[in-house]
Amino acid sequence: MYLTSDAIDLGSLLAQVQSPRHGGIASFLGAVRDHEAGRSVVRLEYSAYQPMAEAECARIVREAESQWDCAVALKHRIGRLQIGDVAVAIAAASAHRNEAFAACRYVIEEVKRRVPIWKREVFADGGVEWVGNGAGGQGNSGAVEEANTLVDHAADTTNAYNATRHGTES
């Protein structure tokens, strides 16, 4: 299950993806912040169309795992969250860090774009605003392209660093 009303434990997600064949592990935590668009936030309330959200999360995880030969763990909170609570957590592990970073980035971007989860922001001034995610029906080529660009950039940076360290030009 990807959705939970319980607090998210990053340690349990890391344990799900750790393996002797995985040398790079990347994680992302999305926490409830105290402001949005210049307004003071009191809390967030997440709701979801659970059957569809679970299915879409599973698809996103499978896509990332096949695209980057990695293991991915994902949890998203539903219900009432206070400032500082973790709303979403992702862990991605692969043989190398570049793929782990790319998979982690891909998963969060696709969850935000495709999964039917709605956020109700409650403001200190008494205002309330709904923000909806997902079910856009769009393809995922943009997120894959962005994640692959990050992998390429990380590889270029690593090669440049190694060349400088070893006194050679790349």
Image (spheres, helix red, strand yellow):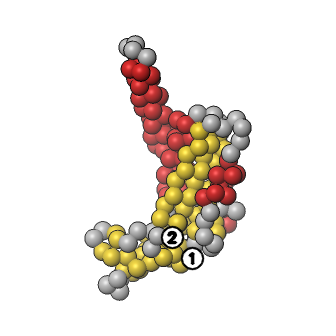
Q: What residue type is labelled 1?
A: Gly
Q: Can residue 161 be seen here?
A: yes
Q: Residue at the spot x=30%, y=74% of the render?
A: 39
- Residue 6: where, in percent of width, then height? 63, 72
State the count of labels.
Answer: 2
Q: Which residue lies furthest to the bottom in this view?
A: 126
Does dot 1 land on a helix, a strand or a loop? strand
Q: Residue furthest top?
A: 168
- Residue 75: where, in percent of width, then height? 61, 61
Instruction: Tell me the quarter of the picture where residue 154 sits.
Output: top left
Dot 1 corresponds to which residue? 79
Dot 2 corresponds to which residue? 85
Q: Quick one: label 1, few (<14), some, or many (20+) residues within 10 Å?
A: some
In the image, is residue 68 above or below residue 120? above
> Which mark is first along the chain, 1 or 2?
1
Q: Quick one: label 2, few (<14), some, or many (20+) residues within 10 Å?
A: some
Does dot 2 land on a helix, a strand or a loop? loop
In the image, is residue 38 above or below residue 91? below
Which corner quadrant holds the N terminus? bottom right
Q: Residue at the spot x=39%, y=14% of the render?
A: 167
- Residue 144: where, in percent of width, then height? 51, 40
Q: Residue at the spot x=48%, y=34% of the render?
A: 151
Q: Is residue 165 left or right of residue 57?
A: left
Callout 2–callout 1 Cβ contact below 8 Å: no
In the image, is residue 123 above or below residue 52? below
Q: Residue at the spot x=31%, y=84% of the render?
A: 125
**32 or 132: nearer the viewer:** 32
- Residue 20: where, in percent of width, then height? 72, 38
Q: Is residue 6 left or right of residue 150?
A: right
